[in-house]
Image (cartoon, helix red, strand yellow):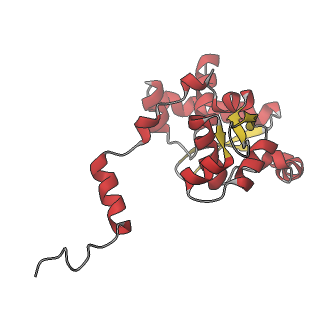
């Protein structure tokens, strides 16, 4: 097994969210299945022999990396920390609004999301993903929020210009119309024909 092939396998395993079959690896690496199978088994043995923090297992018809069983106690302690917890759906929605609309006030975020976002903003601020970037002009001078360099780092982008265009995630008007139909008020009886 070449170092290059082992490194490619590790990189793919690192980002995979579910077990990958040997055939899937072979397709991605453009290599024969038998060669990839041998490389996966060699990587598994290498990880076990080197005392690394991860192990490679063949599960559910595919291959996946797991933390080493002997690291469990330390991982449980880490999992109890605030840094280890994942962001809620509300926090992710709020983060998306701030990322694309910044600078934005708490009230504007709530208006876009349709629910109060104070707690989500507080969570994002405590995690260092958003920060106060100033005050709105006008009555009340609301706090304005923007994303941080840590947000860019976590997302793996160099700047806000590297965010995917929002239009790529908006469904066509015909789909929006179908989705909104149940929420539209019914036509009045005078509008209907008999």
Q: Position of residue 94 (x, y in %)?
A: 63, 47
Question: Residue at the location (73% across, 46% down)?
Answer: 140
Question: Residue at the location (20% across, 78% down)?
Answer: 190
Q: Position of residue 172 (x, y in %)?
A: 31, 45
Quadrant placement of the N terminus: top right
Front-lying residue, 164 or 12? 164
Front-lying residue, 183 or 88? 183
Relative to 87, residue 154 above or below: above
Q: Quadrant of residue 114?
A: bottom right
Relative to 144, residue 117 above or below: below
Quadrant placement of the C terminus: bottom left
Front-lying residue, 175 or 70? 175
Question: Residue at the location (66% across, 58% down)?
Answer: 116
Q: Position of residue 31 (x, y in %)?
A: 45, 24
Q: Quadrant of residue 156?
A: top right
Q: Position of residue 139 (x, y in %)?
A: 70, 45
Front-lying residue, 8 or 136? 136
């Amino acid at each position: 097994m070449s170092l290059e092939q082992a490194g490619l396998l590790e990189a793919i395993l690192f980002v995979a969210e579910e077990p990958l079959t040997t055939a899937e690896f072979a397709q991605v690496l453009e290599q024969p299945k038998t060669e990839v199978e041998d490389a996966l088994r060699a990587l598994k043995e290498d990880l076990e022999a080197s005392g690394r923090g991860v192990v490679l297992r063949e599960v559910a018809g595919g291959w996946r990396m797991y933390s080493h069983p002997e690291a469990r106690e330390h991982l449980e302690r880490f999992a109890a920390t605030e840094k280890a917890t994942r962001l809620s759906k509300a926090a992710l929605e709020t983060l998306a609004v701030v990322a694309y609309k910044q600078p934005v006030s708490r009230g504007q975020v709530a208006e876009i999301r349709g629910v109060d976002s104070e707690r989500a903003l507080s969570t994002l601020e405590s995690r260092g993903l958003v920060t106060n970037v100033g005050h709105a002009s006008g009555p009340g001078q609301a706090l304005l929020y923007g994303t941080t360099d840590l947000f860019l780092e976590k997302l793996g982008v160099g700047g806000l210009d590297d965010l995917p265009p929002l239009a790529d995630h908006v469904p066509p008007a015909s789909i929006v119309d179908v989705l909104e139909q149940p929420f539209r008020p019914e036509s009045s009886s005078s509008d209907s024909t008999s």
